[in-house]
Amino acid sequence: MGNGNFKKIALSLAGLLLGLILAVVLSSQLSPKGEVSGTEGIFTGAIASKTGVPDDIVDAALKTYVPPGEHDEYYMFSSGGHSGHVFVYGVPSMRRIRTIPVFTPESAVGYGWTEESKEMLGEWRWGDAHHPGLSETNGEYDGRWLFINDNANSRVARIDLDSFTTGQILGTVPNIYGPHGAAFVTPNSEYYMMASRFAGPVPHGTYSPIENFSEDYKCILAAIAIDPEDGEMSNPWQVLLPPWSYDLSDAGKLGSDGWAFLTSYNTEEAYTLLEVNASQRERDYIVAVNWRMMEQAWKDGKYTVIDGANVIDPLDVPGAIYLIPCAKSPHGVDVTPDGKYIVGNGKLAPITTVFSFEKFMECVENNDFQGEEAGFPIVNYEKVRVAEVEVGLGPLHTQFDNTGHAYTTLFVESAIAKWSLDTFEVVDKIPVHYCPGHLVAAEGDTVSPDGKYLISLNKLAKDKFLPVGPSHPESMQLIDLTTPKMKILYDNPVDPEPHFAQMIKADKITKNVFKIYPKDESQPGAVYTKEDARTEKNGNQVTVYMNSFRSRYYPDIVEVDEGDEITWYVTNTDFDEDITHGFGICLYDLNIEVQPGQTTSMKFVADKPGVYPFYCTNFCSALHQEMQGFLLVKPKS
């Protein structure tokens, strides 16, 4: 090597070393103490010095950045509200990973067009997906299933988390009107509980004048049983409740396991101008239900069959229901991770009320009551109450971390209050944008929350994002819980409406996710070779057994007669991850999606004569455009 080249190399290395030293020194001066170090500190200081961006913004960007090839630490499942879907996000990146259609057709994946999904959806074309609840084992999320209620049509769905698809829809569940008070799974996934938001005559279809509201209108708590092997849902029993509105609910944990807690408002039993007439009392109730006693009553035959459902009158099961007075018009009720406290949020009061489960049980055992209503004992408020935490205006919902703190949304104040479960004092408050309803913490509804992240589910976005006309997106804000003061890390526009969400460690789910459907020769309609692909005709009944493979359909020409009733099976024989095929027929309003290894089907009547191209609607290969064929419908004449 010549002396000239050697000197050039030596100077280059010296310059690189000097630059590295300067970057380290600069980063130590610019970065907050203890927040970043090492390579992260070098990048933070370098970026901040170059762009003038404040360190806290650079720090937030680094905490939410997930590099290419790496995955998020958590899944978050958020309700899609009146879209009828569930939205899946990665945390901390806040990237939307998937939309799971549940109660509403979704043409992108053919949901509502396949026979399998049409059967689940039944007569309904929309739903109002409200409160997702993950399956649990011993009070911990286990990553098997996600359940969610349809507030509009009294249904509940199970999403299988090994495939992220809807596996079952149960309902319309008899007798229940608008199961808004459905927000929890019991600690070992025995039940998913659903309670009425609206009172009405039972069964459905019964007429009674509105003036008979207090006498003829009822609410229902429906216990949706979950098979521990396959998650299959059923409704073995229901409980009659007074005609109040049941808003949200939670299950007892550990020492309080076996109890369910439901917030109620409109204990005035008003039926018009509720914003005034349902807000007359200073306190409504948290309704405490001993669901194990109700379960035993059902087993003992203490029920009446109404519209096919086994309905228990709780007055026939003394000691199964008690009323806990709670600040006016409570919204959320949340049980602390240790099961010791019940937290009620009266949305028309500036306080969150903390009740002791131990003191509640003492009141029950000692008959320490301050009266009764609708035949149910009212426990002594002064005895069962532990604290009234002055959190702020419009408290709605509370979550918990791993350090003994609770977090409560303040709708009117547009803020989140952090308070201590030890001293019951507010220790921090952060503004959010705007009007938060619910919030979700990492593993926040379990017996051992993670802390770390909190997400505010805001009802309004206002000026937060680029304008898109009169209809605005809604807003989620990711909040850092690892620093002494809460910090907003990320603003995310979202489709309406994130009523509720749950956040689970990703590895609880990823270990069970399959990516290719296994070959199953016994599955109806499945064809795995082109030689078995065929069209069979029996009178006006036509069955197509189609094989799809990059980049060809077998058969690719299908001839039928006008008026034929067609059952069309499609099998995707690309046993290769992420090679999805679609199948759409032009001008017939038909499209389905077929995952690797999957067989699915659709049925329709060939009621339009002519020639109709069909094609693959999911891009699958370089010859994707060539993956097409023709449906020929011969006219009757």
Image: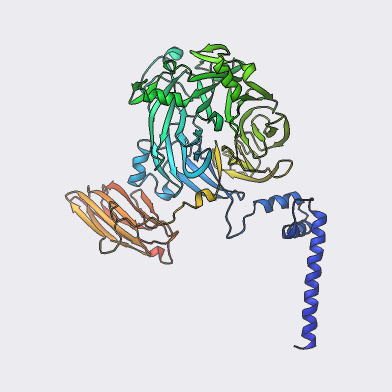
Q: Nearer the viewer, residue 363 or 425?
A: 363
Q: Nearer the viewer, residue 41 or 375?
A: 375
Position of 525 relative to 483 (above/below): below
Q: Residue furthest bottom?
A: 2
**Side of 517 relative to 395 (left or right):** left
> Total label count?
0
- Spot the residue most to the top: 371
Residue 259 appears in the rendering: yes
Q: Nearer the viewer, residue 346 or 623?
A: 346
Is 476 left, or right, of 47 in this rendering?
Answer: left
Residue at 70% from the left image edge and 50% from the top image edge? 60
Q: Residue at x 25, y 61 (%)?
A: 532
> How is the rendered protein coloured?
rainbow
The answer to which of 625 and 40 lies nearer the viewer is 40
Quarter of the N terminus within the rendering: bottom right
In this view of the protein, can residue 176 be seen by the observer? no
Q: Position of residue 344 (x, y in %)?
A: 60, 26
Q: Position of residue 181 (x, y in %)?
A: 50, 28
| Residue drawn at 48 percent across, 18 percent down | 319
Instruction: Please identify the residue farthest to the left as the structure is shown.
Output: 539
116 w.r.t. 633: above or below: above
Considering only vertical position in the picture, is 148 above or below 37? Answer: above
Q: Position of residue 302 (x, y in %)?
A: 37, 20
Image check: 184 left or right of 400? left
Residue 148 at x, y = what percent? 47, 37
Left or right of residue 12: residue 338: left
